Image (cartoon, grey):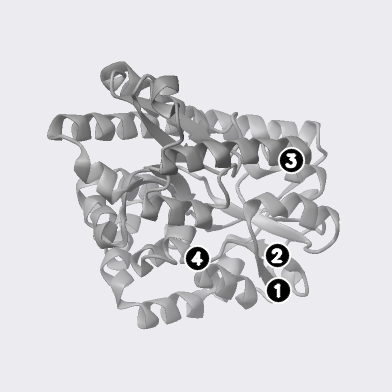
Amino acid sequence: MKLWKRLMAGVAAIGLACGLTGCSGLDSITGGKRIIRIAHAQSEEHPEHIGMLKFKEIIEEKLGDKYEVQIFPNELLGSAQKAIELTQTGAIDFVVAGTANVETFADSYEIFSMPYLFTSQDAYREVMNDTEYMQKLYNSTDESGFRVLTWFDAGTRNFYSTKPIHSPDDLKGQKIRVQQSPASVNMVKAFGAAASPMSFGEVYTAIQQGVINGAENNELALTNNKHGEVAKYFSYDQHQMIPDVLIGNTKFLDSLSDEEYDIFMEAAQAATEVELEEWQKAVLEAKEYAQNEQGVEFIDVDVQAFRDKVVMVQQDMLEENPNIVEMYEHIQQVNKKYE
């Protein structure tokens, strides 16, 4: 499997290099169409990939005489961090990545890494579906070379480990993989665990070899990424709701005609709608499979006990990053509607 992935990555890299350097014969192979390259870290069965297939369908249906969309899943073009850099430079056109990765390029996105930012799924979805409000944030990175088009539900993040976690005390001494986000690192430290930032694709082997005890993510990580084979305890502490976002190269987006841009935005919105529907089904299926086939034990915990441990993490973030204060206050107003 690893060999196959390396071979595919090599093929993808060769194709990418050809696209950048103008390899002889490329235009004839593609019929003169502009190739749109999209990278993401998930498998072909993941709701985000299914959403991007909808994106591809709409673009090629309405603009197929000009564009061909190619999707590279499973980190074939590198980790999320690397793929964002490639999108910035225009080496690829789009990437789907978590906002925890985006915040290293734009600190306004750090807001989503704040533990217990949202008090419910309803509040989370209302904020993210408020396209007019979110547009201010999405457009704020234009000078950095990229712009967010839409969001995808990545569920509620919880801890899973080779050891059961019933309370924050059970995290003490454990090594937990986190996303490359200072807020996530500080959160895990507040729980008494050691934070180990690493690429998502490295997590399975790291748990298997005992380099780390566990990670924090949604239920799909147990099944789509097979983490349930090596980590048998999943605790519903519900510490974060961090969306993934579809990021486009600003120069490419600005090169589109108004009509083309509207079609790309229509395709992005349709991708979100498909992903949201697929997500709900996928979570239920993943939990059932993890319990019955992988032997994962799901543990309900006292969420408030975990929330109390990270109050200072929230306060420190607001004091150290004034760019997140306005959005934090907006989200608190939405939270109150669902109390």
Q: Residue drawn at (43%, 62%), measured in percent from left and top?
A: 117
Residue to which mark 3 is pinned = 226
Separation (CA) of disc 2 from disc 4: 16 Å
Residue to which mark 2 is pinned = 176
Separation (CA) of disc 3 from disc 4: 25 Å
User: Residue 199: x percent and y percent?
Assistant: 63, 57
Separation (CA) of disc 4 from disc 1: 17 Å
Q: Is residue 253 visible?
A: yes
Residue to which mark 4 is pinned = 115
Dot label at residue 194: 1
State the quadrant of the C terminus. bottom left
User: Residue 218: x percent and y percent?
Assistant: 60, 47
Q: Residues within 10 Å of mark 4 (few under 14, many from 20)?
A: many
Q: Secondary structure at mark 2?
A: strand
Residues 68 and 105: in front is 68
Camera-side mark, 4 or 1: 1
The residue type indicated by label 1 comes to Ala
Q: Is residue 236 visible?
A: no
Q: Which residue sits furthest front?
A: 24
* Earlier sequence position, callout 1 versus callout 2: 2
User: Residue 116: x percent and y percent?
Assistant: 48, 63
The residue type indicated by label 3 comes to Lys
Res 174 quadrant in image: bottom right
Separation (CA) of disc 1 from disc 2: 6 Å
Q: Residues within 10 Å of mark 1 (few under 14, many from 20)?
A: many
Q: Is residue 320 left or right of residue 286?
A: left
* Earlier sequence position, callout 2 versus callout 4: 4
State the quadrant of the N terminus. top right
Kindly check if marks 1 and 2 are in contact, taking CB atoms under 8 A apart as contact: yes
Q: Residue drawn at (32%, 58%), measured in percent from left and top?
A: 336
Separation (CA) of disc 1 from disc 3: 23 Å
The residue type indicated by label 2 comes to Ile
